[in-house]
Amino acid sequence: MQVGVLTVLLGDQPLEDAVEYLDEIGVEAVELACGGYVGDDHLPTQDVLDDEDAQSELLAVLDDHGMDLAALATHNNPIHPDEEQAEADDTQFRDAIALADQLGVDTVVNFSGLPGGSPTAQVPNWITAPWPPDHAEALEYQWEVAIDYWSEIAPLAEEHGVDIAVEMHPNMLVHEPHGLLKLREATNERIGANFDPSHLYWQDISITDAIRLLGEHDAIHHFHAKDTKVYEEQARTRGVLDTQSYGDVADRAWSFRSVGYGHGEQHWKDVVSTLRMVGYDGVLSIEHEDALASPTEGLEKAVDVLKRARFEETPGDAYWA
């Protein structure tokens, strides 16, 4: 397994400087954002798509530091009820798939997207309960929209030889493993998970059980290493559907944390071991969103934990069996 980084946290630096720093702290792979909510500081799609010289320059920067390009990220909402935004996000997503193919990258990360609750809706609607009945009807409509859209994306991904890693994320239609499997079953095996445990912890989902469930279907295409801490004192009165600012850490029921600061090192060793059990031996891509740590300090602490937790070598035969 490689320790990687989604480079958004270093977006204020030129890519060459960011990669040099990441190499120095022991990072082996990068995930580059190319649009959507994560921005495109290090990979503006339209500057690189169909431009062999620009692509060669990009790959040379990575090669100079022995850095692998693990995935492209374009987190957006291509099924947004606003047609103009949906069209722009869809174009960005399709361009990212084409660019991944041209760069020799086999994974693109995105959200499932989230429609409104009806054909006349103007904003997305995240439905978390089946009652009153109009919510269940709205959810059924949303899945129809999503399956129609993703039934076009799945064969496109197959055509380009690219896996789509859908990040299970609250405020998106697919926010937990069973929804991910529903979308995969309705499309093809190019559709799988970007397994980011930080969004599952506060939903009270067992991370190792979820890995095993998705692993049974060979449905984990990518992994984001990000932690979450649930603060029980606040959760007892607020619950976990917390709409306060992420920066208001002291009063939130839960917050994103650097790896090891929400759950201890033994937990992360269990996570890595379970990933290996189900056949995932890819990149552990660190995403830093800890309001209590600077980007570099939070990143370096995460690298430290993951380097001790991950496996580097192929397991040997069970000679004792």
Image (cartoon, rainbow, N blue to C red):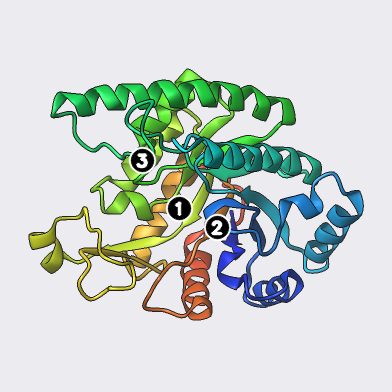
The first of marks 3 and 1 along the sequence is: 3
Which residue is pictured at 84% across the width and 53% down the height? 55
Q: Amino acid at mark 1?
A: Val
Image quadrant where one finds the C terminus: top left
- Callout 3: 10 Å neighbours few (<14), some, many (20+)? many
Residue hosting label 1? 272
Q: Position of residue 314 (x, y in %)?
A: 61, 48
Q: Position of residue 173 (x, y in %)?
A: 38, 36
Q: Position of residue 42 (x, y in %)?
A: 69, 63
Which residue is pictured at 58% across the width and 65% down the height? 8
Residue hosting label 2? 38
Give how far apart the Cα atoms at labels 2 and 3 are: 18 Å
Q: Nearer the viewer, mark 2 or mark 3?
A: 2
User: Please, what secondary structure does the residue beneath circle 2 have?
Assistant: helix
Q: Amino acid at mark 2?
A: Val
Q: Amino acid at mark 3?
A: His
Which residue is pictured at 53% across the width and 25% down the height? 149
- Quarter of the figure with residue 228: bottom left
Give how far apart the Cα atoms at labels 3 and 1 are: 21 Å
